[in-house]
């Protein structure tokens, strides 16, 4: 017998009905974000961090398969988790579908994925005490350090993670990862939702000559324990993430 869910997260059915409109063909919104609660994480207790990460990663892949079936109903059944592979830089992509861009993330009891028509990056983080938070903050862009310093003490943890998911989503969208210096781009400023490089006057500049600008959408999640952001060259993001159930099949 399954135990009653008491996590406080919205149920998949409730969020699915309110956020999804059935349609044929490619999605009308360029970037969609999906979330799932990882119900089997409790089973990983005592089995080590590597086992827990694998459970999280597996849940994220299952979530992606469900999301793709919702996004492309005419291709339902065609997608396989084995098609989720990584390029030479470690950025995941869907083999055989060059026009579908994906991103995966997981932290704590949540897994997230994003689907778009252009490169996309998503990051979700459980807000927790991080011993190296101050050291990481010193590596950020000067404007971001100032933004953090201006937050009240009780807001510091949330502010740090809100900022970090913005940074991480950009690094994932570009495929650069941590090869790109954290102080070489800024995600706060006069154009708050624009993710790109800023000069000392907070003027937006592109990452490299000829490269497109990137844009960020941040979401507030129920419970206040997680930070979530998605980044893409697109500007049309889903209004709210869609919750789905991606429980393991027995």
Image: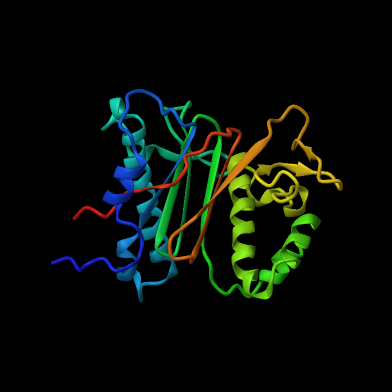
Q: Residue furthest left?
A: 1
Q: Could you tell me if residue 245 is visible in this image?
A: no
Residue 36, given in percent of the width and then of the height, sits at: 36, 53
Residue 108, given in percent of the width and then of the height, sits at: 44, 65
Quarter where residue 121 is shown = top right
Report the number of discs.
Answer: 0
Which quarter of the image is occupied by the N terminus? bottom left
* In the image, residue 179 above or below residue 100: below
Residue drawn at the location 36% of the way across and 59% of the way down: 55
Residue 232 located left or right of residue 109: right
Residue 74, given in percent of the width and then of the height, sits at: 29, 25
Residue 74 located left or right of residue 142: left
Which quarter of the image is occupied by the C terminus? bottom left
Residue 40 located left or right of residue 156: left
Residue drawn at the location 35% of the way across and 65% of the way down: 8
Report the coloring of the rendering. Answer: rainbow
* In the image, residue 29 above or below residue 197: above
Residue drawn at the location 30% of the way across and 27% of the way down: 75
* In the image, residue 227 above or below residue 100: below
Q: Could you tell me if residue 144 is visible in this image?
A: yes
Instruction: Say which of 118 and 61 sits in front.
Output: 118
């Amino acid at each position: 017998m399954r135990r009653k869910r008491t996590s406080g997260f919205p149920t998949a059915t409730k969020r699915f009905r309110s956020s999804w409109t059935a349609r044929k063909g490619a999605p009308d919104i360029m970037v969609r974000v999906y979330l799932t609660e990882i119900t089997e994480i409790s089973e990983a207790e005592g089995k080590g961090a590597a086992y827990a990460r694998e459970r999280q990663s597996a849940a994220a892949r299952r979530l992606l398969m469900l999301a793709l079936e919702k996004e492309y109903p005419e291709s339902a059944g065609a997608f396989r988790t084995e098609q989720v592979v990584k390029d030479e830089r470690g950025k995941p992509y869907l083999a055989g579908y060059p026009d579908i861009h994906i991103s995966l993330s997981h932290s704590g009891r949540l897994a997230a994925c994003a689907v778009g028509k252009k490169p996309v990056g998503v990051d979700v983080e459980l807000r927790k005490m991080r011993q190296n938070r101050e050291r990481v903050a010193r590596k950020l862009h000067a404007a971001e350090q100032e933004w953090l310093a201006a937050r009240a003490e009780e807001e510091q943890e949330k502010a740090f993670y809100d900022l970090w998911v913005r940074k991480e989503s950009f690094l994932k969208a570009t495929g650069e990862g941590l090869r790109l210096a954290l102080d070489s781009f800024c995600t706060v400023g006069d154009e708050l939702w624009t993710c790109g490089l800023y000069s000392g006057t907070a003027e937006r500049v592109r990452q490299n000559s000829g490269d497109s600008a990137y844009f960020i959408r941040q979401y507030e999640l129920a419970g206040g324990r997680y930070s979530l952001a998605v980044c893409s060259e697109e500007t049309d993001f889903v209004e709210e993430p869609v919750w789905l159930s991606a429980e393991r099949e027995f």
